[in-house]
Image (spheres, rainbow, N blue to C red):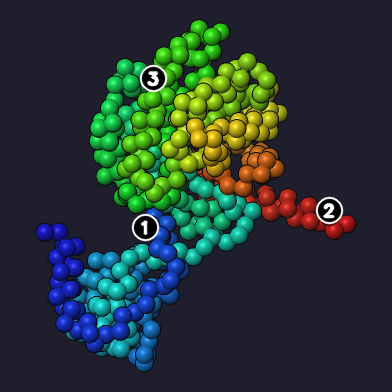
Amino acid sequence: MSRSTTALIAATAIVLPSLSQFATAAKPASKSTSSKQSTGSKKLSSKKAATKQKAAANYQVQMEDCDLNTDGRVDVTDIMMVISEYGNDCTTADCTTDVNRDQSINTRDLLAVLSNYGTLPVAPAPETLLSGVRACLQSQFSQDASGLRNLGVENDTWMVMGSALGASNNVSEDAFFATSASDIEHQFGRYLANQSDLNADYDGMLVLDIEFPFHPSQLGKFINPDSSSYDPIKFDAIVDAYKLRIAVVREMMPNCKLGLYGFPTPHPHGKLESNSEQERIMGYEMAAARGILDQVDIICPVLYQRFGQNDNNYSRIASYTVNGIQVGRSLRRTDGTALEIQPLVSFKIYNGSSDHHMELVQISDLADQIEVIRAEGVEEFMFWSGKDNLTGSSTITDRLADLLEELDYRSNDVMVASAR
């Protein structure tokens, strides 16, 4: 029997005889959130000092009073803390465990903790010029949830690596096609078992990053008769392999908002009329007609910046961004319904042909791109990063703070100009 189970049984054995004598403390009315959203909630908690405290007649116990170790959750650890001081008073014990402030650690304190068992609600993020922005890390949430929240940025998006779905970067084409639903369920189940922040009830954003052995941007070449890779049968097999993986995730995590990475990824030169871009669009549209998006909730145009300020095609960033959004909006499920648009942008330049490859995107360029995105009527989008640290001295929170400062500066300039 686990320690947590033993603790719950012990606590229940102590408190059950007194249930009829105790008025259960009311939980806050707001909806509970998952544990990962509560990171940093200890800063919001009005904890009692861990010293003697005055008795408070008829004190109304709050949920944060029961979070004795200030980790954002009322759980077995808090129950154990009360049990360890059970029977003491505030002259011999740490009064933090005197939850109801009657200067005695007793059954009423245990009942208060049990009745408030769960995750503390998180205060809403402030309204800023980054409201609508989400942090999206690879197989993790940001460890600086409170810092992001103070900027108005959400921390509720998870990018699933392809290896969790039988699509690692070294998978062969034959293995990709041969992977069965049970194989994917097993692999994805193992992946979930190792992620303490994810479970079947997760209702945040989940983006499937399937890029190997076929990236979504390559689909068009298999149905373009002018392409040397023309192979409609392989195209159908690729789409079916994608659909199988999406279906397994949808069944295992029915409450999440599901997105698919790379749908679409516009050509970086930003020329919608070019043959290469038309080939890509044809691939997205035909895959959508074959049902690849039927169980997907979100279109995630990949709008990573590909050029630095000295590159020849640097001026194409705006048109590239607009093309990705417009193509994403044009895609439909087989029943004709549209999908929510949530573009993916990045903190770094990703283009092996550029001298600026892997450099941080200039803050002014990020602000320019956000203005383009919002001019297209898109208010919610994601900043992707593999992890919190971008460089040895910069994190995603640092970068977003600088970006917010730039956006505020531009907004103030507009207000001053309008007032003249």
- Amino acid at dot 3: Ala
Quarter where residue 180 is shown: top left
Mark 1 or 2, nearer chain start: 1
- Residue 205 percent across, percent down from the top left: 45, 46
Judging by the rendered image, the residue that carries numbered circle 2 is: 417
How many marks on residues?
3
> Can residue 211 be seen in this snapshot?
yes
Judging by the rendered image, the residue that carries numbered circle 1 is: 35
Pick the residue in front: 278 or 391.
Answer: 278
Mark closer to the observer (1, 2)? 1
- Residue, far bottom: 57
Q: Which residue is located at x 56 percent, y 21 percent?
A: 282
- Residue 299 percent across, percent down from the top left: 52, 37
- Residue 111 percent across, percent down from the top left: 26, 78
Judging by the rendered image, the residue that carries numbered circle 3 is: 237
Mark 3 or 1, nearer chain start: 1
Question: Helix, strand or loop at disc 1?
Answer: helix
Task: Say whether residue 268 is left or right of residue 248.
Answer: right
**Mark 2 and mark 3: Cα distance apart in space:** 57 Å
Residues packed near mark 1 inside 10 Å, few (<14), some (14 to 19) or many (20 plus): some
Mark 2 or 3, nearer chain start: 3
**Mark 3 and mark 1: Cα distance apart in space:** 39 Å
Circles 1 and 2, Cβ within 8 Å, touching? The answer is: no
Pick the residue in front: 224 or 406.
Answer: 224
In this view, 273 is above or below 417? above
